[in-house]
Amino acid sequence: LAKTTQPISMDSYEGQEVNITCSHNNIATNDYITWYQQFPSQGPRFIIQGYKTKVTNEVASLFIPADRKSSTLSLPRVSLSDTAVYYCLVGDDRYSSASKIIFGSGTRLSIRP
Amino acid sequence: KAGVTQTPRYLIKTRGQQVTLSCSPISGHRSVSWYQQTPGQGLQFLFEYFSETQRNKGNFPGRFSGRQFSNSRSEMNVSTLELGDSALYLCASSLLAGVEQYFGPGTRLTVT
């Protein structure tokens, strides 16, 4: 099971682009990379998932280099409402058990006016 | 499509009591997982159900149990509550199983 490492906290300002990098050196062939966002006293919210190269949706972009040993979540033009904890997860193929999914400490992102 | 719902949202119990929490997954989702979240331990996996069968259980004492009904709704029960059981209990559902899960708002349990 691949372990992930991400910064404990990050600060940025409204309107800026924020990039959060996650390291997962032991990622396996079948592993997907998934990011969640969590606001205080709420459940995590699925943001984006990818396997390789680049994935983009209406919320964020996920960049995965060829070796897949790291990934970067990119949030364009952040606002105060993007202040949250962001979790990077690396899990087996999409049909594996939830028991294999480990939420680490996450990155606490603080956005200032 | 309605999201995952959990009831109750807030609960206060005293030590030694028991509690039952309920989770209704997204319509069509057959997999339900439960997590405990505390400031010190983060998000920890409790158990996972799929089609009424418990597939996996996390490293929690036997006081924590759960079940899933034929309509995929799930309940978890904690008996003989301890102060350390105070936490946010989160339920998540997914179509099959795996990393793409949809979480409910959680039940905040306070044990006094």
Image (spheres, rainbow, N blue to C red):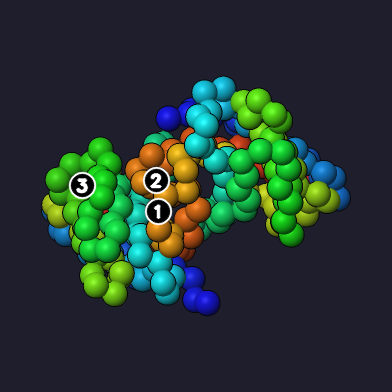
At 47% from the left and 43% from the top, the residue drawn is: A93
View extreme (right): residue: A15
Instruction: Tell me the element at label 2.
Output: loop
Tell us which disc is closer to us: 3 or 2: 2
Q: What residue does disc 2 label?
A: A96
At label 2, the amino acid type is Ser
Tell us which disc is closer to us: 3 or 1: 1
Q: Calculate the distance from the C-alpha at mark 1 to the C-alpha at mark 2.
A: 6 Å
In the displayed structure image, the side of residue B57 where residue A108 appears, left or right: right
At 15% from the left and 49% from the top, the residue drawn is: B63
Question: Disc 3 vs disc 1: Cβ atoms closer than 8 Å?
Answer: no
Q: What residue does disc 3 label?
A: B82
Q: Quadrant of the N terminus of chain A?
A: top left
At label 1, the amino acid type is Ala
State the mark number for residue B97. Answer: 1
Question: Disc 1 vs disc 2: Cβ atoms closer than 8 Å?
Answer: yes
Q: Calculate the distance from the C-alpha at mark 3 to the C-alpha at mark 2.
A: 32 Å
At label 3, the amino acid type is Glu
View extreme (top): residue: A25
